[in-house]
Image: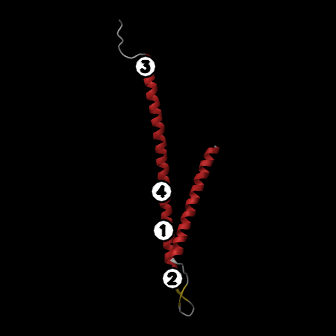
Amino acid sequence: MKISRGYSLIEMLIVLFIFSMIALISLSFLSSSANSFFQINSKTDNLKQLIVATEVIRDDLVHASDKLARNEFGVKKQIFFISPFLIDSIASSILSNFISVIFCFDFIKKFNCLIK
C-alpha cells in the first residue's frame, strides 16, 4: 500500500486560482471605494464653498436692506427694502442654481469622457 504525502500539483493550482480570484475581487472593491471616497470629498468641498457663498450673499442682502439715506431736503428715507423672508428665499434659490450648475458641469465632464 502506497502512502500519499503532501498535495498534488492540481490541488495547489486550484488553491492558487481561488486565492487570486479573491485578491482580484478585493482589489477591485478597494479601488472603487477609494475612488468614491475622493469623489465624495470633492463634492463636499464644493458644497462647503457654496454654503459660504450663499451666507456671504445673504449677509450682503441683510446689510443692504435697512439702509437710510437722506434726500435733497435732508429727510431720511429708506432706499432699499427687503423682508427677511425674501432674503432667505433669494439665498436658497441662488444655492439651488449653483448646485444645478455644478451637476451640469459634472455631467458634461462624464459625457466628454464617454465620447473620448
x then y, percent, for residue 14: 45, 22
Q: Residue at x 56, y 90 (%)?
A: 71
Structural distance between the alpha carbons of marks 1 and 4? 15 Å
Classify 65 as above or below 93.
below
Location of mark 3 (residue): 11
Q: Secondary structure at mark 2?
A: loop
Location of mark 4 (residue): 45
Residues 63 and 103: in front is: 103
Q: Given the image, on which type of amino acid does mark 3 rest?
A: Glu
Location of mark 2 (residue): 67
x then y, percent, for residue 37: 46, 48
**Mark nearer the N terminus (2 vs 4):** 4
Residues 90 and 54: in front is: 90
Location of mark 1 (residue): 55
x then y, percent, for residue 28: 48, 37
Residues 18 and 115: in front is: 18
